[in-house]
Image (cartoon, rainbow, N blue to C red):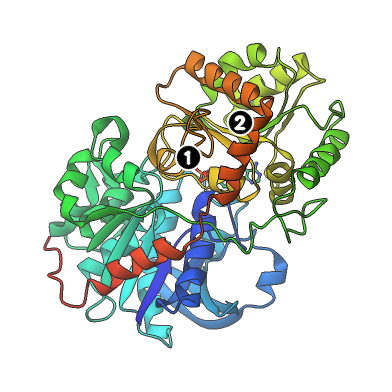
């Protein structure tokens, strides 16, 4: 069994801003439970980690990390939860701020984290075979591991969860922060900037991304955010592995956050809908279809389409709840649309895990018309709660949601192809019609109930990648 060290910037249950945290929180468990690999996880010690977790941590070591000419102190903590050993790297200057990212020096913060991960190898009581980095925040860790390996024979895997976010810094950062010989500059630079995502892609032994469709899409300039030629060069080492969800955690039959637990009962699901209608002053009617959005409110998620057609769609006897935070433009416009339709629509501008689960449980439909979507976990969580996803056919959405066809009776959701508001509206209208056509609806619900997105197969696919290093030829720079 291989020993794997995951390095990441977020992980449930400690800190979460999106799907990355769900994946880093659940894939190691799946690998461990199936005895496919021994996994440990290393994370930044953010201030916002709840104190119940901080209290359980033990300090292992403190050591210096050189960031250019400066010494920064890293303190390594650990805790064990559900058989998984987690490590946390603390530093007062970089990680005692509010929240996770969004600071002017995010690049530097993850230079520090990545260097601190390299030095943490001196203090582990296990010897990883593979360092598995996730997204730009750990691209540098993967790169440093290649350029000056912390231990012999360490292999690296780098997973792209979203290529849009790359961690770019002015090129002077190489001299100022990296303490590396100039010959390595080109492996870290892209388009005149230091680019953490590119650094990971260039140096990793294997690259994965979170769905087969996205693995194809990102070789194309429309999706690659400028990195297609880097990916094209690494094509042989790139594969797509679809994300799973933790089916023990996202489980409506035991989820403590929801009002009425259920497995397949639509009656009990409607009990949850009624609770939400009461809570948010919507008219109480169990038979009105409830549509929800639970998302970061950013352009990627296709909200320009929803902005365009919301007024028209709300002419139907439907209800719509939006839970999310993000760009001011969307927060503002969705709040305004909700004011115009106060009996039918509510906009809740916050990040609230418990409420999100109540909404997944209460809803009939989950809306996700993304412009692009590497995998998307929300539609998978919706399916776990027997809620019908309505998505645009892109990336992982295309790989997990099949459009319902009333004639063949196949499909577990609704989808549309072009990024076009009227196609989206027609798809919403179709969902409304099917909801009121009891035969079709019954059939659709049956398909939704059968949809399974646990980790079993994908965990096996990751193991195949880890095991492939046994006698593989390592990527040459
Ligand atoms: P992304 O990682 O691009 O944000 P995903 O669909 O992969 O999108 O994952 C989003 C995760 O974040 C899901 O677990 C979703 O339920 C959760 N989430 C998004 N917005 C909120 C919110 N406002 N409150 C609670 N959970 C949220």
Crowd tier of the residue under label 1, counting other residues whose Cα lies within 10 Å: few below 14, some 14–19, many 20 or above:
many
Number of marks present in the image shown? 2
Observer able to see residue 38: yes
Q: Residue at x 40, y 77 (%)?
A: 37
Q: Which mark is residue 303?
A: none
Q: Earlier in the sequence, mark 1 or mark 2?
A: 1
- Tag 2 secondary structure: helix
In the foreground, 112 or 213: 213
Quadrant, the C terminus: bottom left
Locate residue 46: give its quadrant: bottom right
The residue that label 2 is drawn on is 440
In the foreground, 112 or 426: 426
Q: Is residue 160 above or below residue 219?
A: below
- Tag 1 secondary structure: loop
The residue that label 1 is drawn on is 401
Quadrant, the N terminus: bottom left
Crowd tier of the residue under label 2, counting other residues whose Cα lies within 10 Å: few below 14, some 14–19, many 20 or above:
some
Locate residue 476: give its quadrant: bottom left
Q: Is residue 447 above or below residue 403?
A: below
Q: Is residue 351 above or below residue 6?
A: above
Q: Residue at x 69, y 75 (%)?
A: 55
């Amino acid at each position: 069994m291989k020993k794997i060290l995951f390095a990441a910037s977020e992980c449930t249950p400690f800190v979460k801003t999106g799907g990355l945290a769900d994946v880093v929180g659940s894939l190691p468990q799946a690998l461990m439970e199936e005895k496919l690999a021994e996994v440990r996880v290393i994370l930044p010690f953010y201030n916002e980690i709840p104190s119940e977790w901080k209290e359980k941590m033990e300090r292992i070591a403190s050591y210096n990390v050189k960031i250019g000419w400066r010494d920064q102190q890293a303190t390594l903590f650990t805790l064990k939860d559900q058989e998984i050993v987690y490590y946390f790297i603390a530093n007062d200057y970089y990680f005692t701020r509010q929240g996770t990212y969004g600071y002017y020096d995010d690049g530097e913060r993850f230079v520090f984290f990545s260097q601190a991960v390299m030095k943490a190898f001196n203090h582990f009581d296990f010897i990883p075979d593979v360092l598995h980095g996730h997204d730009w925040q750990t691209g540098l860790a993967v790169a440093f591991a290649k350029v000056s390996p912390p231990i012999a024979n360490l292999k690296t895997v780098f997973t792209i969860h979203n290529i849009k976010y790359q961690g770019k810094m002015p090129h002077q950062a190489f001299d100022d922060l990296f303490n590396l010989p100039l010959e390595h500059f080109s492996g870290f630079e892209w388009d005149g900037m230091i680019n953490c995502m590119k650094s990971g892609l260039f140096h990793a032994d294997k690259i994965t991304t979170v769905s087969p469709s996205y693995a194809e899409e990102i070789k194309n300039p429309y999706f690659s955010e400028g990195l297609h030629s880097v990916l094209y060069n690494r094509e042989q080492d790139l594969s797509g592995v679809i994300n799973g969800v933790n089916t023990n955690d996202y489980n409506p039959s035991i989820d403590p956050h929801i009002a009425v637990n259920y497995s397949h009962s639509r009656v009990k699901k409607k009990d949850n809908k009624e609770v939400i209608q009461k809570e948010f002053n919507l008219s109480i009617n169990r038979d009105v279809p409830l549509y929800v959005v639970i998302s970061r409110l950013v352009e990627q998620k296709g909200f320009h389409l929803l902005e365009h057609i919301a007024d028209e769609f709300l002419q139907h006897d439907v209800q719509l709840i939006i839970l999310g935070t993000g760009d001011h433009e969307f927060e503002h416009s969705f709040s305004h649309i909700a004011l115009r339709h106060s009996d039918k629509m509510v906009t809740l501008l916050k990040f609230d895990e418990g409420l999100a689960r109540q909404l997944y449980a209460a809803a009939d439909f989950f809306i996700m018309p993304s412009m692009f979507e590497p995998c998307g976990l929300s539609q998978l969580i919706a399916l776990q709660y027997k809620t019908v996803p309505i998505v645009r056919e892109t990336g992982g959405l295309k790989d997990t949601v099949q459009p319902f066809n009333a004639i063949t009776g196949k499909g577990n959701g609704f989808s549309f192809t072009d990024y076009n508001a009227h196609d989206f509206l027609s798809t919403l209208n179709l969902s409304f019609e099917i909801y009121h056509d009891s035969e079709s609806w019954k059939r659709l619900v049956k398909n939704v109930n059968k949809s399974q997105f646990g980790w079993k197969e994908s965990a096996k696919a990751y193991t195949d990648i880890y095991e492939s290093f046994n006698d593989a030829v390592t990527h040459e720079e």
